[in-house]
Image: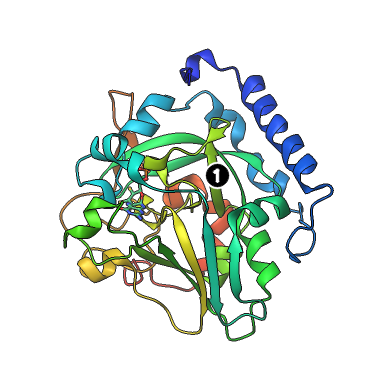
Amino acid sequence: MIIKKPSDIRSSEITSETHFKQRRDIVKTMGLTALTLGSAGTSAQLFAKSNDDDLKSQLTEYKDITTYNNYYEFGTGKSDPAKNAHTLKTSPWDVVVDGECEKPGKYSLEDILKAMDIEDRIYRFRCVEGWSMVIPWNGFQLGDLLKRFAPTSKAKYVYFETLLDPENMPGQRTSVLEWPYVEGLRMDEAMNPLTLFATGIYGKDIPKQNGAPLRLVVPWKYGFKSIKSIARISFLEKQPTSSWQKANKHEYGFFSNVNPKVDHPRWTQKRERRIGEFRKRKTLMFNGYEEQVASLYKGMDLKKHY
Ligand code: MTE
């Protein structure tokens, strides 16, 4: 596969690649009995695109996005996932849906993708460790998918699990984290139009090291909330405990919103090093998405609920 650098890819090209994918998805849907998930909503598409323009000029190189990763199932070093994730088996891929919803079941990724609208989203990505990127994702709104499973009124949280497959995911044969990797969002966070399930980067299928075939993206939260290779979605009444909370609850809270005013116990969160840049940038409240998400946390003490 020839991989272009972002500098070689004009934004019009990125768009046309995605339009190609969208057309392909429409063609796939025709004549096929998609799973009974209803029709896709597009209400919020414009909402998140509004900040694309200033970010287009800041895109991180494809090579950096796909070789500087955290994916502990494939090693703890930043270059390990790109080297080791080739053993991940992404096809066939099923997602188990259970808990507080009216349509639990085992859904094939193929059927899910047939039902969803794939779109482009350029988002800032801020890792808790202090580095950041700007990534052009392809994916669909998580809320569009979740509502098709008809969550009940008891569903207050959504919980996600990464595939458990120690045979093909060598890190799962170690005790560096508790396996499978798990994460959670409050229902309103999951339904927010900014929240994505990503299936691609730069118009190409999402690489294994970045969380193929389905990976969460919550742009106003630290990167570790972006659970990779998702194989289970559960609707829960009670707040789940995430992998990093289990590993160290004093350093990692459930919310993990990007917040320059609340330092990590061992380092500041005021600044970040954008990969590919020399001078550090100021970290923005909610990673620059304050206007869209601050209302979710109205009245909450964000020092306590970190
Ligand atoms: N998901 C799984 N299953 N395993 C992991 O180790 N690491 C998290 C998150 N999702 C991780 C994961 C962390 S710490 C970060 S910063 C992001 O993935 C990194 O995403 P990237 O490699 O695409 O930059």
Q: Closest to the observer: 304 or 161?
A: 161
Q: Please, is residue 204 above or below residue 124 in the view?
A: above
Drawn side of residue 76 relative to residue 288, left or right: left
Q: Residue at x 48, y 17 (%)?
A: 2
Helix, strand or loop at label 1? It is strand
Give x and y (percent) for residue 209: 37, 41
Q: Quadrant of residue 153?
A: bottom right
Q: Which residue is mark 1?
A: 199
Q: Residue at x 33, y 29 (%)?
A: 275
Q: Closest to the observer: 124 or 152?
A: 152
Give x and y (percent) for residue 208: 41, 41
Q: Identify the image quadrant of the C terminus.
A: bottom left
Drawn side of residue 271 relative to residue 194, left or right: left
Give x and y (percent) for residue 22: 72, 38
Neighbor class of circle 1 (other Cα within 10 Å; few <14, some 14-19, many 20+) is many
Q: Closest to the observer: 293 or 140?
A: 140
Drawn side of residue 243 relative to residue 75, left or right: right
Q: Residue at x 42, y 53 (%)?
A: 226
Q: Please, is residue 270 above or below residue 142 in the view?
A: above
Give x and y (percent) for residue 180: 32, 65
Q: Quadrant of residue 38?
A: bottom right
